[in-house]
Image (spheres, rainbow, N blue to C red):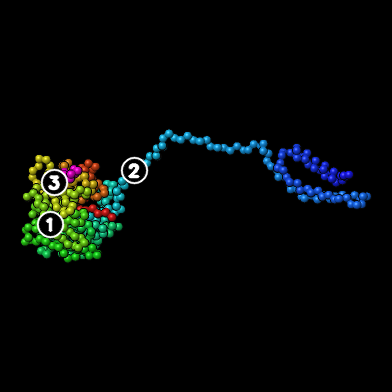
């Protein structure tokens, strides 16, 4: 006969209660029961009932699972974009814009130097706005000066004084000048007429009109001329260069050109500035009786222009850049239309922009002839204007400002002209009553 102890009945009730509770909750994963029922056999002593012990392990707390019916948060999925029908065109590359041409920077200290035959050299500062000149300083050396030349990169300048080549220093802060030294340029003692410094600043070339001679001085470290290392011509040499009137070194420094007024040709020398050597080349003839006097170079074309004193013409020559040889392009008169009598033409210069050429007729006309330059380097006459004086030997054009300065020797005055956009000239200022004849005027910037 079986007997249930109250302990077993109590356990049965507990299990029933747990089952009902779980039925009311959402289903959970079945868990393994950790209850162990320990039963004991009844002892032989019928009067003593023993209650079996119930040992229960600690039940782990149930893990709360999310409600499977609770909706999850919506996730936004980007809508697919339709593919383009055509490949997109690349962004246009902006066209490079040309850099603006900078305005020419005017020098801080623009000077004009004038030389008179009594050995007086005067410095003036230039007002760019109205072209007026203000005297700054003077210096004087005894003798008979004829021309000045500026060093290309040092505050030094040089003068021809009879048969001497003289050096001077220049202070651009106040225009003061100081004599440095000299060297003889002509063994016969004849008057030198013109001189120039080569672009390297190492040599001076001198033309001697009276001595029919061309010479070259090397310069020492201080810029003072030394004894000549090249000298050719002389009073007994009538074939080399009679009446040498000017010596001009080409801007590239390889060739020297000398108008020989009495020989009717242009002497050509080849210069090696590294070795200091000079080689005489075949001269270029000019028209018979023309009397080539001065020349100037075009700033961008391989062309030079020569003014002839005796027949008042200008000749254009093409320069061969390889050997310096000259080929005639054109000869044009400096005289007004209808005038046939020559007018002792003297000096010539090309404007810094290369658009115009100016040449001087001395007495009887005393005019400046104006030409425009064509693409091939040839000239077209544009007109004339009075020199406002008598016997102009020298004039100079400022390289950056529209001013032309002209020295009238016999009327002893210095005249300023404004250069207009079309190349025409307008007189603006005049310095009169100079104590001696001005044979040179030049512009110099620092």
Q: Earlier in the sequence, mark 3 or mark 2?
A: 2
Front one among 96 and 312: 96
Residue 281 marker: 1
Camera-near label (3 vs 2) is 2
Q: Main secondary structure of the magenta part?
A: loop
Around disc 1, counting alpha carbons within 10 Å, would you say few (fewer than 14), some (14 to 19), or many (20 or more)? some
Between discs 1 and 3, the one toward the N terminus: 1
Determine the secondary structure under disc 1.
loop
Question: Which x, y percent locates residue 326?
Answer: 14, 51
Name the mark on residue 97: 2
Of all residues, the one furthest to the front in this rendering is 1
The segment highlighted magenta reads 373-379
As measured in the structure, the alpha-carbon distance from the residue carrying label 1 to the one carrying label 3 is 20 Å
Earlier sequence position, callout 1 versus callout 2 = 2
**How many angstroms separate mark 3 from mark 2 (CA)?**
39 Å
Percent from the top left, x then y, of residue 304? 16, 50
Indicate the quadrant where residue 140 lies. bottom left
Q: Is residue 264 visible?
A: yes
Determine whether, in the image, residue 443 is placed left or right of residue 42: left
Residue 329, numbered label: 3
Quadrant housing residue 6 = top right
């Amino acid at each position: 006969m079986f007997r249930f102890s109250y302990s077993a009945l109590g356990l049965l009730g507990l299990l029933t209660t747990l089952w009902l509770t779980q039925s009311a909750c959402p289903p959970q994963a079945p868990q393994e029961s950790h209850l162990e029922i320990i039963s004991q056999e009844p002892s032989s002593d019928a009067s003593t009932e023993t209650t079996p012990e119930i040992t229960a392990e600690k039940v782990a707390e149930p893990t709360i699972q999310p409600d499977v019916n609770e909706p999850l948060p919506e996730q936004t999925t980007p809508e697919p974009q339709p593919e383009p029908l055509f490949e997109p065109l690349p962004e246009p590359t902006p066209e490079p814009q040309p850099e603006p041409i900078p305005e020419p920077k005017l020098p801080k200290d623009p000077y004009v130097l004038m030389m008179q035959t009594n050995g007086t050299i005067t410095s003036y500062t230039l007002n760019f706005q109205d072209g007026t000149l203000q005297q700054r300083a003077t210096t004087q050396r005894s003798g008979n000066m004829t021309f000045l030349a500026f060093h290309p990169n040092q505050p030094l300048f040089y003068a021809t004084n009879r048969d001497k080549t003289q050096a001077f220093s220049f202070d651009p802060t106040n225009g003061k000048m100081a004599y440095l030294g000299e060297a003889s340029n002509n063994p016969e003692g004849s008057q030198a007429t013109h001189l120039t410094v080569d672009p390297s600043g190492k040599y001076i070339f001198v033309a001697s009109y009276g001595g029919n001679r061309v010479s070259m001085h090397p310069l020492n470290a201080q810029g003072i001329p030394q004894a000549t290392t090249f000298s050719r011509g002389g009073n007994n040499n009538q074939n080399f260069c009679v009446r040498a009137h000017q010596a001009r070194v080409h801007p590239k420094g390889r060739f020297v050109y000398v108008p020989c007024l009495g020989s009717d040709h242009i002497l050509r020398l080849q210069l090696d500035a590294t070795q200091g050597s000079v080689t005489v080349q075949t001269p270029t003839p000019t028209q018979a009786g023309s009397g080539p006097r001065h020349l100037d170079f075009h700033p961008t074309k391989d062309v030079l222009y020569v003014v002839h004193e005796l027949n008042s013409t200008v000749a254009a020559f093409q320069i061969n850049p390889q050997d310096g040889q000259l080929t005639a392009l054109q000869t044009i008169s400096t005289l007004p239309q209808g005038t046939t009598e020559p007018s002792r033409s003297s000096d010539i210069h090309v404007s810094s922009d290369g658009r115009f050429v100016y040449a001087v007729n001395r007495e009887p006309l005393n005019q400046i002839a104006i030409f425009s330059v064509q693409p091939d380097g040839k000239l077209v006459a544009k007109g004339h204007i009075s020199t406002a004086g008598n016997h102009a030997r020298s004039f100079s054009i400022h390289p950056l400002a529209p001013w032309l300065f002209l020295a009238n020797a016999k009327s002893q005055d210095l005249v300023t002209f404004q250069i207009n956009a079309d190349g025409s000239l307008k007189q603006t200022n005049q310095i009169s009553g100079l104590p001696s004849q001005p044979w040179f005027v030049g512009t110099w910037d620092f």
